Image (tube, rainbow, N blue to C red):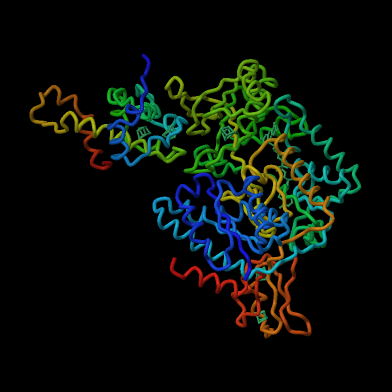
Amino acid sequence: MKRIGVFICHCGINIAGTVDVKRVAEALKDYPGVVLATDYMYMCSDPGQSLIRQSIKEQNLEGVVVAACSPAMHEVTFRKASAQAGLNPYQTEIANIREQVSWVHQDDKEAATRKAIEHIKTIVEKVKYNESLIPLSLSLVKKALVIGGGIAGLQAAIDIATAGYPVVLVERSDRLGGHVGQLSGVYVNFNAARDLLQSKLQAVQANPRIQVFLETEVEELGGYVGNFTAKLKHRGSDGSEPTFSEHTFGAVIVATGHSLRPLSKFGEYGGGRYPDIIDALTFERMLAPDGPTGGEIRRPSDGQVPRQVVFVQCAGSRDPEHHMPYCSKICCMYTAKQAALYRQRVPDGQAYVFYIDIRSQGRDYEEFVQSAMTQHDVLYVRGKVARLYEEDGKVIAWGADTLTGKPVEVQADLAVLATAVMPAEGAVELAQKLRIATDEHGFFSEAHPKLRPVESLTAGIFLAGTAQAPKDIPETVAQASAAAAKVLSLFSQRELVAEPTIAYVDEELCSGCGLCIPACPYQARTMHPWKHKAIVNEALCQGCGACVVACPNKACKLRNLTPSHVLAMMDAYLAEV
Amino acid sequence: MRIQLSATKVHNDFIRKVEDMSGQDLLKCYQCGECSAGCPAAFAMDILPNQVIRLLQLGEHEAVLKSKTIWLCAACQQCYTRCPKGVDLSRIMEAVRDLLMLEHGDRIVIEKLPAETLAEFPQQAFISGFRKYTA
Ligand SMILES: Cc1cc2nc3c(=O)[nH]c(=O)nc-3n(C[C@H](O)[C@H](O)[C@H](O)COP(=O)(O)OP(=O)(O)OC[C@H]3O[C@@H](n4cnc5c(N)ncnc54)[C@H](O)[C@@H]3O)c2cc1C
Ligand code: SF4
Ligand code: SF4
Ligand code: SF4
Ligand code: SF4
Ligand code: SF4
């Protein structure tokens, strides 16, 4: 029988506070196959890992069970430790007695301890049947797809191409640049947005490794990290039929940016009926030298220069009842910029900013907002505007100054709404095509909010810019460079290794019925053309097990989770403790 | 005057009763002031609707009980309609009024009121009238 070692982790008091680890070790000591059962304060620590390594060597262990936290945390750690001691890593398994036992049974220590014992015995049975496996090696296409040609997509494409790899940059509209191309000056120095963008556009044009497709979208994405296949849809000119092209890529960066909550959603502010109640992007165009007014501030209704302008912050943000619950992050800053620019262009004009809180986190940001108040004489009023309407050519704003405790009214000539930042149109549909996740609002979800902020949960697909969450230009550019760095570290490998714990077909049992083929969510199964037996594409298979359930002949199996494994595990689980 | 804050004060019984009776979580209010900005009666109030909630959050219900605002509130629910956080301020005003009247003897015996007082008294009757609808 296989010689198995069981290592029980206290996880400080996380496990040991609820599970009686000493009793667990005692209970497993004499279990068939177990030659060593021991506990330790932190198994994942250096001394914990060396305890495992030493025991493998001293006791000639052929299998290891680490009873600890979720395999999502440390399976890799412990398998690596086993490999260092000469044991095939697939002979090491985790029994999760933290998330599945101690954390959920804190009020019943006796039951938790019994459950931990059952759990570990089950995994011991699994290890008895485990085969030694070798990771798969897959080929790697060193070419990247960048979706979205805003500042995020441009930066990512430049970084990857500069490192020597080809990039395809796909932009839906007829020009590169995204929102930055529509801005006037940017905070905190009022530099022209057009100059910032121009430097990036030139870098893209100058680099022969970057191929740009305008008026193009991703129609389909198949494959897997290192070997994605993409079908691109190119809009036909003047209403002619679209054309398609196919490409292969090793990695994808999603940089589709954002949109703004439309004025029609703001019943309280006129719902878009009034010409002189506009959103901040329209005002930004008014300020831009290449905009419709050539940089002059003229209100839409009659072309007059507005003498009093009301800026409404948090329009549609931080409002879980009617709009979006989150803070859009950039609008406090750009409102200060817009109000200051207005005051520069209309020196005798008065600007009011209605705000709830001012969020100015960044180098020189707080100073910038202060300068809007002091140098540029913008009057900040602390209270959210409840109502905007037009009367006799004026925009009437109803607010409150919560600092004095008085209701206030302004008869303005123009109102500018800092409308909520939302995901780009079609983001959710794109996420479905790419098989990546979005949050409840449609922003693409990162793999881990702290430690993997530029990766999606799908290997090989990375996120950059406002497609992931609201952010300003410096943060967008930083995230884009980070995503590019992830792609480059992928491309720096000679080949890809993948987990071997995937499906295989027992050809003697397979009747060629084909039931497993549509059951596979990853298109990993096909029928052998003349053997009439199912085959598995090892690169596509994710080991999900859907085919195993579909197969009426028990011909589909998962490596190291065969029916023999599962039945032995069930027997152990159902036995009395 | 400096308000003395303490754990017992900010969690006092009166506050808890207001929350129970109104069914509102006072701490949901983040003091944006949108209720006050839209309130049709705010011009006549001594403290603004958002300040009523703020004082209650601080455990300063005495100041609220003394204010005219709770009696001027017309229960029109404009504030609730606008509130980004879904706080039904008109119910909070109602709860404060109810608690005040429970404490001081709610019943007004109309016949016992002097005629000249009665002549000046539509407000209370008015308030009593809509209490039926909101409470
Ligand atoms: C009014 C306003 C003022 C601002 N002022 C400032 C400022 O002063 N300073 C500052 O730092 N930041 C400012 N910002 C923020 C700045 O605009 C953003 O940080 C920046 O635009 C984010 O870049 P991005 O590439 O992530 O997204 P975007 O600029 O939105 O670009 C995304 C691109 O992707 C394309 N796209 C979308 N979907 C698809 C698809 N399915 N397929 C292909 N292509 C697609 C879009 O057409 C677009 O070209 C401001 C924003 C606004 C709204
Ligand atoms: S950044 Fe400022 S204006 Fe924008 S939602 Fe957040 S707090 Fe409101
Ligand atoms: S295990 Fe899942 S991914 Fe693999 S072949 Fe079966 S159904 Fe497809
Ligand atoms: S379902 Fe089973 S028997 Fe049918 S083709 Fe697939 S592997 Fe073969
Ligand atoms: S319910 Fe009362 S506080 Fe609210 S808006 Fe109406 S009058 Fe003002
Ligand atoms: S509108 Fe709502 S959140 Fe804002 S101050 Fe009034 S009650 Fe509080």
Residue A20 visible in the current orientation: yes
Q: Position of residue A400 (x, y in %)?
A: 46, 26
* Number of on-image labels: 0
Query: Front-most of A5 and A575?
Result: A5
Q: Quadrant of residue A483?
A: top right
Quadrant location of the C terminus of chain A in the rendered image:
bottom left
The one nearer the camera, A110 or A386, is: A110
Apparent side of residue A231 relative to residue A522 in the rendered image (left or right): right
Q: Quadrant of ligand 5?
A: top left
Q: Position of residue B8 (x, y in %)?
A: 32, 28
Residue for point 90% across, 44% down: A207
Instruction: Compare residues A538 and A422 and report the one nearer the observer.
Output: A538
Q: Nearer the viewer, residue A209 or A240?
A: A209
Q: Residue at x 78, y 44 (%)?
A: A485
Q: Is residue A470 left or right of residue A231?
A: left
Residue A377 in the image: x percent, y percent? Answer: 61, 17
Residue farthest along the left direction in this orientation? B112
Dividing the picture into quadrants, the one containing residue A537 is bottom right
User: How far across and how far down the image is residue A442, in percent?
Assistant: 61, 50
Q: Most extreme residue toward the front, as rendered?
A: A58
Which quadrant: the N terminus of chain A? bottom right
User: Does residue A259 appear anywhere in the picture?
Assistant: no
Q: Is residue A257 above or below residue A38?
A: above
Which residue is painted at 44% across and 56% down in the image? A112
Q: Quadrant of residue A271?
A: top right
Q: Is A395 drawn above or below residue A33 in the view shown?
A: above
Residue at screen point 36% across, 20% down: B4
